[in-house]
């Protein structure tokens, strides 16, 4: 569905964990080309890399929930670090393929608790693009959700219809962001998540280098895979999975393409 | 489809599944409630809709802008006629259980067709309610606050 939406259809995925039910609000999802306030043309400008956006999700405010392994406190109280973040925004329903998503890797700057009479909240601030992020060369965090967080048990043979907004084909690369929250199978639950592209939404090929590589999905996995900034990406995109010893993988996948 | 969708929301709520409770659409309000109809929940015939207001959300006059439409749907839940069981506690405890089931269904389906969000709340009596001619029933009054986007 297109159009306006409301907060409850936003989701927050961090480092392979679904933080949605622990989160109350997210930050401004900043994407700005800023300059130092009051800077003159001849001044040296600090904290700004010319031509690059300052990108940050801002703060995530939630509940201090100590549910073992998957609770917000368990996942994010461990200190600062590099976080893989996806914030898909569903259109008046849970996020689905084609919905907008803010995604990337960001440094966690803090973790704070706020105690009140009837609540104990927790908040954390995410800084700008992580220096470790493979996507550092890109300056856009908004992309398309190619796969909503759900389980898949077979390769994708469907036409997605997920078209570039503006271009039939681009040579500006892009990057994928993935969150694998659960899996089933045998051994190490091996599987590969990747992206296919198509010129006509009918004939599909694997998009070169847009793959996670084979992952051990017996534990949560997350990350960013960036293409070369001149890589060709055809008009349509879809998710793909190759199952080895995994029989089911629950994942979310986003692709951000400069246009 | 652009427009006020009150009838659609009534219809959506009537299609919720609550074990043992018959939820009626606005065009299915019973003329008379008999024992065999219970438990039943239907729009309050004396005030099915209240608190209607429109809140403009964007620039644009008339339908060119975005508007939120907010209102409350009022329901009557009838569990059983007063005196239909020898022991009061049986009807009261069963009614509390059904109230929980109704709330569960509404909380779990807060994006019913026609609405962007719904929030149920108890409104008025929880115990004995009367019909238009003064018959007494075990029941409660339920209000459901609705928000819809006019343009979708």
Image (cartoon, coloured by chain):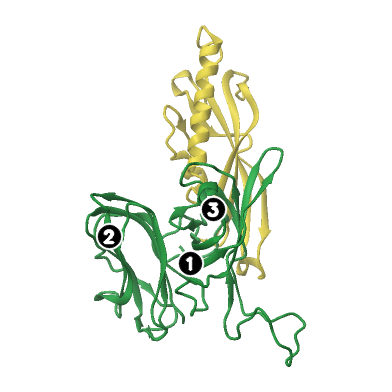
Question: Numbered disc 1: what chain?
Answer: A
Question: Numbered disc 3: what chain?
Answer: A
Residue in view at x 51 percent, y 6 percent: B86
Placement of A243 over or under B117, stated as above or below: below
Quickly name the residue at label 2.
Answer: A191
The N terminus of chain A, quarter of image: bottom left
What crowding class fits label 2: few (fewer than 14 Cα within 10 Å), some (14-19), or many (20 or more)?
many
Task: Tell me the element at label 2.
Answer: strand
Placement of A124 over or under A3, stated as above or below: above
Quickly name the residue at label 1.
Answer: A100
First of labels 3, 2 by sequence position: 3
What is the distance, in whole Å, between disc 2 and disc 1 at their CAs?
A: 26 Å
Question: Numbered disc 2: what chain?
Answer: A
Percent from the top left, x then y, of residue A83? 50, 62
Residue B42 horizontal side relative to residue B57, left or right: left
Percent from the top left, x then y, of residue B100? 52, 29
Task: For chain A, give the colour.
Answer: green
First of labels 2, 1 by sequence position: 1
Placement of B15 over or under A180, stated as above or below: above
Quickly name the residue at label 3.
Answer: A76
């Amino acid at each position: 569905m297109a159009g306006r939406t409301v907060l409850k259809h936003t989701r927050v995925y961090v480092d392979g964990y679904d933080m949605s039910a622990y989160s109350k609000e997210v930050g401004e999802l900043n994407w700005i080309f800023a300059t130092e306030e009051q800077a003159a043309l001849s001044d040296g400008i600090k904290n700004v890399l010319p031509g690059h956006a300052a990108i940050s999700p801002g703060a995530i405010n939630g509940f201090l929930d100590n549910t073992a392994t998957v609770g917000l406190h368990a996942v994010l109280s461990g200190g600062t670090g590099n976080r893989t973040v996806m914030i898909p925004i569903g259109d008046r329903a849970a996020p689905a393929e084609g919905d907008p998503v803010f995604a990337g890797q960001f440094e966690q700057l803090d973790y704070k608790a706020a105690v009140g009479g009837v609540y104990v909240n927790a908040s954390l601030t995410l800084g700008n693009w992580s220096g470790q992020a493979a996507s550092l060369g890109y300056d856009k965090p908004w992309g398309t959700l190619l796969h909503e967080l759900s389980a898949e048990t077979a390769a994708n043979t469907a036409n997605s219809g997920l078209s570039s907004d503006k271009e039939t084909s681009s040579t500006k690369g892009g990057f994928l962001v993935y969150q694998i929250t659960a899996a089933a199978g045998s051994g190490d639950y091996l599987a590969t998540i990747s992206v296919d592209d198509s010129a006509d939404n009918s004939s599909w090929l694997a998009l070169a280098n847009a793959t996670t590589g084979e992952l051990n999905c017996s534990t949560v996995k997350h990350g960013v895979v960036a293409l070369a900034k001149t890589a060709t990406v055809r008009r349509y995109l879809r998710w793909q999975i190759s199952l080895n010893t995994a029989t089911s993988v629950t994942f979310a996948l986003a692709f951000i393409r400069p246009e | 489809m652009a427009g006020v969708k009150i009838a659609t929301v009534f219809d959506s709520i009537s299609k919720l599944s609550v074990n043992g409770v018959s939820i009626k659409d606005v065009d299915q309000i019973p003329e008379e409630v008999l024992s065999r109809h219970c438990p039943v929940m239907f729009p309050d015939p004396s005030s099915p809709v209240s608190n209607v207001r429109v809140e403009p959300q964007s620039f644009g006059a008339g339908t060119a802008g975005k508007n939120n439409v907010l209102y409350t749907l009022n329901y009557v839940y009838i569990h059983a006629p007063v005196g239909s069981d020898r022991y009061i506690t049986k009807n009261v405890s069963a009614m509390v259980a059904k109230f929980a089931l109704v709330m569960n269904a509404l909380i779990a389906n807060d994006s019913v067709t026609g609405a962007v969000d719904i929030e149920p709340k108890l409104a008025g009596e929880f115990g004995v309610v009367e019909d238009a001619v003064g018959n007494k029933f075990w029941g409660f009054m339920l209000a459901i606050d609705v928000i819809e986007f006019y343009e979708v």
